[in-house]
Image (tube, rainbow, N blue to C red):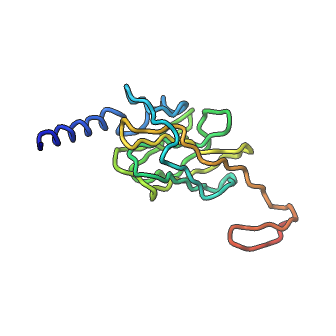
Amino acid sequence: MELLLSALLALQVLSLSSGYPNGAPTGACEDMMPRHAGVQPQPSPAPYVVLTNSKTFQPGQPVTVTITGPEYRGVLLEARTKGSNNALGNWNNPPPDTKFLECTGNPQGAVTHSNTNLKGNATVYRWMPPNSTNPVYFMATVAQQRAVYWINVRSNPLTRGRSTAGSGRRSQFGNGCKCWNG
């Protein structure tokens, strides 16, 4: 029995290490497929949800992104606009056990795992939006292990928030102050 358990453990370690334990390849940037040979993604719905701290974005104001659900070992996370497979914006300071991945010529266009350590709901990603007026969503591939992963896990779309500077209109700021601008 011990021999069987040891063999199963060795196979598990081999299956994790034969994927991409140090991060997704750049070839995964467009289609979000992790390139694990002989393995297909799990069917939807995924047990993961991509959440943001806001329904809107403003250039220069970071957006906080989390992936909630069971712990995971592998991740590829990008921001995109509808109809485009290009990574948008820049990620800031990747959390522990993750790193930047250059996608579509953008050195900080995506975040991926840097090892197979477990990541969970406490893993917080920060994204800096570009000067864009198009709605944005976050797209993730999340892997529990080499052979168990989901692609195209999407957040709800974020729209660009209206700039209130000089508008002369009353607005509600995030600090609870109802103030006059302009």
Pick the residue in front: 92 or 65: 65
Q: Residue at x 34, y 49 (%)?
A: 117
Quadrant hosting residue 133: top right
- Residue at 49% over, 53% down: 68
Quarter assignment of residue 62:
bottom right
Percent of width and height locating residue 85: 61, 33
Q: Is residue 40 above or below residue 56?
A: above
Furthest-top residue in this view: 38
Question: Which residue: 58% across, 44% down?
Answer: 154
**Can you say whether 36 is above or below 98 in the image?**
above
Confirm whether residue 14 shows in the render: yes
Q: Quadrant of the C terminus?
A: bottom right
Q: Dividing the image into 4 quarters, which one contains the N terminus?
A: top left
- Whether residue 145 sits left or right of residue 53 in the image: it is left
Residue 132: horizontal and vertical position, in percent? 71, 44
Q: Nearer the viewer, residue 88 or 1?
A: 1
Query: Residue 122: x, y in percent?
Result: 45, 59
Q: Residue at left 39%, top 44%?
A: 144
Q: Nearer the viewer, residue 157 or 94?
A: 157
Residue at the far right in the pictured view? 168
Q: Is residue 108 visible to the viewer in this orientation of the structure?
A: no
Number of marks present in the image shown: 0
How far across and how far down the image is residue 88, in percent?
Answer: 62, 41
Relative placement, left or right, of 149 versus 173 is left
Residue sitting at the far front: 1
